[in-house]
């Protein structure tokens, strides 16, 4: 089964992975399982970093694994192995069965509902292997670092440039007859540098970074532009000041704004909901955001970083409005949490798929003008979120804005509020959309928060 594929980065054919999954399911059935599911996967890649133009690390990775979950009625057991031999598979299935025998019954345990399983698996163009060697990768990382170092004489040190190219493939199968999977790829290039005030060497040092990532190398930003962005972001942070405590508008820069959407997703996801540990309990049909705000889930975007035709349980994904006119239309549920809540899976076992938050039309400059006087946040520190109450308090750094223009950098401050109020207080959504992850949103302007400083 481990026959290599010609001109492929993988060691196993798709058919071989399907055969391994079927073998595991057969072993589970023979062992007395009433139901079973298995995922077989493998991946490989290259990661490389340079610092001051010299190669610092080179890592080639290749891994594989099989995970199996078995059900004895309402009792579940899980085990995994990286050994694909027949003996290892048999031992792994027996281990899962043994665990299930000693596990308490759970009425919500079990496979996904048969009627929700994906019947068609469209090609979402997620696989773009990059045939790049070590020297070519090093040249790109060097170009990225050089782009950053050339921005300003005050950039005095570098944490280096890094490149990563990864591919993977998987097959998920269960005893309901579902079997599906696909290959995917992810490429990335990044750079981080350090700047210091030349007048006070060693005193006022600042660090920042930038990166680009995509399914296909051709879709990434150029190495030079990534480095230049990293350099510019680092230099602009020099000579930061502190602020006195105040109430003011806060503008979350797009890469940071994605975290606000992530907090919303977490609050309406199954685990927090059925455990009653969310400040948005029973929020279905409730007005959580202003009427102009929409959140759409779009799993089928070609080359999307979070595109998927089905979730980790084989449930078909679907285009849907999660929030419409500020009102919550649906939760993020897998099969287990859905049963706990008396609902149906939304195809989100494993997470959300390409959330789109449309802009209200303002570009970044227009958002600054709309804010007038306030705080632009470009970095957050710590994890100060109470999911039960919605209380939010994070260390922050960024820039003070006066009359719609960035005035000076600020640091060593804390921003605080409650996510309920923050969500309702969203005043605008920028057109500078962040596209490097699973949540696509521009900068978010919130009408008022507490900024604690000196």
Image: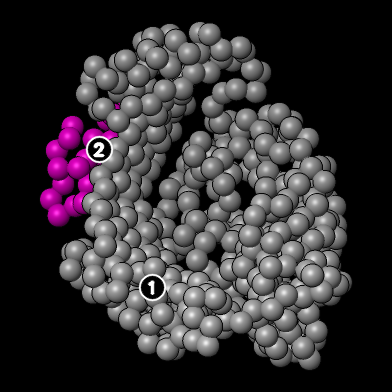
Residue, x 57% and y 34% (percent of image)?
Answer: 115
Q: Which residues are magenta?
A: 1-22
Residue 298: image quadrant is: bottom right
Q: Position of residue 47 (x, y in %)?
A: 29, 58
The quadrant of the picture occupied by the N terminus is: top left
Which labelled disc corresponds to residue 158? 1
Residue 159: image quadrant is: bottom left
The chosen color scheme is one colour
Which labelled disc corresponds to residue 15? 2
Image: 439 above or below 242: above
Q: Residues within 10 Å of mark 1 (few under 14, many from 20)?
A: many
Residue, x 64% and y 55% (percent of image)?
Answer: 382
Q: Residue 285 versus residue 207: which sits nearer the camera? A: 207
In whole angstroms, how far apart are the C-alphas of marks 2 and 1?
46 Å
Residue, x 73% and y 51% (percent of image)?
Answer: 385
Q: Earlier in the sequence, mark 2 or mark 1?
A: 2
Residue 80: image quadrant is: top left
The quadrant of the picture occupied by the C terminus is: bottom right
Q: Report whether residue 235 is seen.
A: no
Q: Position of residue 341 (x, y in %)?
A: 74, 32
Image: 168 above or below 256: above
Which labelled disc corresponds to residue 334? none
Going by the image, does 122 lie left or right of 54? right
Q: Report whether residue 371 is seen.
A: yes
Q: Residue 349 versus residue 45: which sits nearer the camera? A: 45
**SS category of the residue bearing label 2:** helix
Question: Looking at the image, do the residues carrying marks 2 and 1 touch, with CB atoms under 8 Å apart?
Answer: no
Residue, x 68% and y 29% (percent of image)?
Answer: 339
Going by the image, does 302 lie left or right of 446? left
């Amino acid at each position: 089964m481990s026959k290599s594929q010609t001109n492929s980065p993988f060691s196993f054919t798709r058919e071989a992975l399907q055969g391994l999954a079927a073998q595991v399911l057969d072993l589970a059935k023979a062992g007395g399982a009433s139901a079973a599911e298995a995922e077989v996967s493998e991946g490989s890649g290259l990661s490389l970093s340079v610092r001051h133009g010299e190669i610092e690390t080179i890592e080639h990775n290749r891994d594989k694994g099989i995970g199996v979950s078995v059900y004895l009625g309402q009792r579940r057991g899980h085990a995994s192995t990286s050994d694909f031999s027949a003996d290892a598979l048999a031992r792994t299935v027996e281990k899962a069965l043994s665990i299930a025998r000693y596990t308490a019954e759970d009425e919500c345990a079990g496979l996904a509902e048969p009627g929700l399983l994906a019947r068609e698996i469209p090609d979402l163009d997620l696989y773009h292997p990059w045939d790049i060697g070590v020297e070519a990768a090093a040249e790109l990382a060097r170009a990225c670092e050089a782009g950053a170092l050339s921005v300003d004489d005050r950039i005095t040190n570098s944490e280096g440039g890094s490149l990563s190219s990864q591919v993977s493939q998987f097959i998920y199968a269960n005893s309901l007859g579902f079997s599906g999977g696909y290959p995917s790829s992810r490429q990335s290039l990044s750079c981080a540098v350090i700047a210091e005030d030349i007048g006070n060497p060693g005193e006022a040092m600042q660090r920042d970074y930038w990166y680009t990532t995509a399914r296909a190398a051709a879709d990434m930003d150029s190495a030079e532009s990534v480095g230049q962005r990293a350099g510019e972001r680092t230099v602009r942070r020099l000579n930061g000041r502190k602020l006195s405590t105040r109430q003011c508008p806060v503008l979350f820069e797009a890469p940071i704004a994605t975290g606000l959407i992530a907090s919303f997703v977490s609050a309406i996801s199954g685990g927090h909901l059925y455990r009653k540990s969310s400040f948005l309990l029973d929020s279905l049909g409730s007005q959580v955001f202003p009427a102009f705000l929409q959140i759409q889930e779009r799993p089928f975007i070609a080359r999307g970083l979070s595109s998927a035709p089905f979730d980790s349980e084989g449930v078909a994904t679907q285009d849907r409005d999660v929030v419409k006119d500020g009102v919550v239309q649906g939760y993020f549920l897998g099969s287990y949490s859905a049963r706990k809540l008396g609902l149906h899976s939304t195809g989100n076992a494993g997470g959300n798929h390409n959330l789109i938050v449309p802009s209200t039309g303002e570009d970044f400059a227009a958002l600054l003008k709309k804010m007038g006087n306030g705080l632009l946040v470009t970095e957050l520190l710590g994890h100060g979120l109470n999911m039960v109450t919605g209380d939010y308090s994070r260390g922050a750094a960024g820039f003070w804005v006066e009359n719609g223009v960035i005035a000076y950098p600020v640091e060593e401050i804390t921003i605080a509020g409650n996510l309920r109020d923050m969500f309702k207080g969203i005043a605008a959504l920028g057109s500078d959309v962040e596209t490097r992850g699973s949540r696509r949103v521009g900068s978010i302007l919130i009408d008022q928060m507490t900024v604690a400083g000196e």
